[in-house]
Amino acid sequence: QVQLMESGGGLVQAGGSLRLSCAASGSIVSIRNMGWYRQAPGKQRELVASVTSSGSTNYADSAKGRFTISRDNAENTVYLQMNSLKPEDTAVYYCNARLTITTGMTNVYWGQGTRVTVSS
């Protein structure tokens, strides 16, 4: 019914940049919040950043000043531009979307995750 497809992860040196993308597809009527979470080895999944349908953003303290979340409503896509990456940013990054499908149901959907590795 609904798929969230992430891309853009990889290996980068500390101080480098990566841009993650997540495209939502399927029987979608509308998308409310979209966001990025991450889960490092041995840690709980945590919010990195989120954006509402009107463009209001929210960032984890660890992401402020370095990461920028944006979305293209026409393409049902959310982006995460990550600059000044640090080894502690190493994690699997998951896309998340709260959306309404054609049946009228509203649920939260998750992508499969994309791995980001930052070497020191």
Image (tube, rainbow, N blue to C red):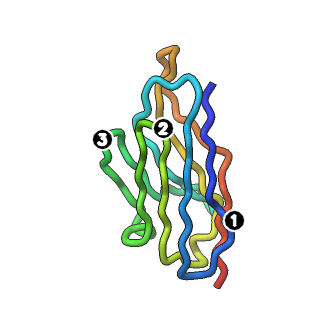
* Residue 116: % across, % down: 64, 65
Q: Give the number of the mark in front: 2 or 1.
A: 2
Q: Secondary structure at mark 2?
A: loop
- Type of the residue with mark 2: Asn
Q: Amino acid at mark 1?
A: Pro
Label for residue 117? none
What whole-number distance in Å separates the C-alpha atoms at marks 3 and 1?
Answer: 33 Å
- Of the numbered discs in the image, which one, if any, rests on residue 54? 3
Single out the mark in the foreground, 2 or 3.
Answer: 2
Residue 52: where, in percent of width, then height?
Answer: 36, 43
Residue 27 x %, y %: 56, 22
Which of pointers 2 and 3 lies earlier in the amino acid sequence?
Answer: 3
Q: Quadrant of the C terminus?
A: bottom right
On residue 41, the disc is 1
The residue that label 2 is drawn on is 76
Q: In the image, is residue 95 above or below residue 3?
A: below
* Neighbour tally class for label 1: few under 14, some 14-19, many 20 plus, Cα within 10 Å: few
**Mark 3 in CB contact with mark 1 (< 8 angstroms):** no
Compared with residue 7, is residue 23 higher up or lower down, i.e. above or below? above
Above or below, 36 against 28 in this view is: below
Circles 2 and 3 in contact, beta carbons < 8 Å = no
Q: Name the residue rendered at 47%, 35% in the picture.
A: 98
The quarter holding residue 86 reads: bottom right
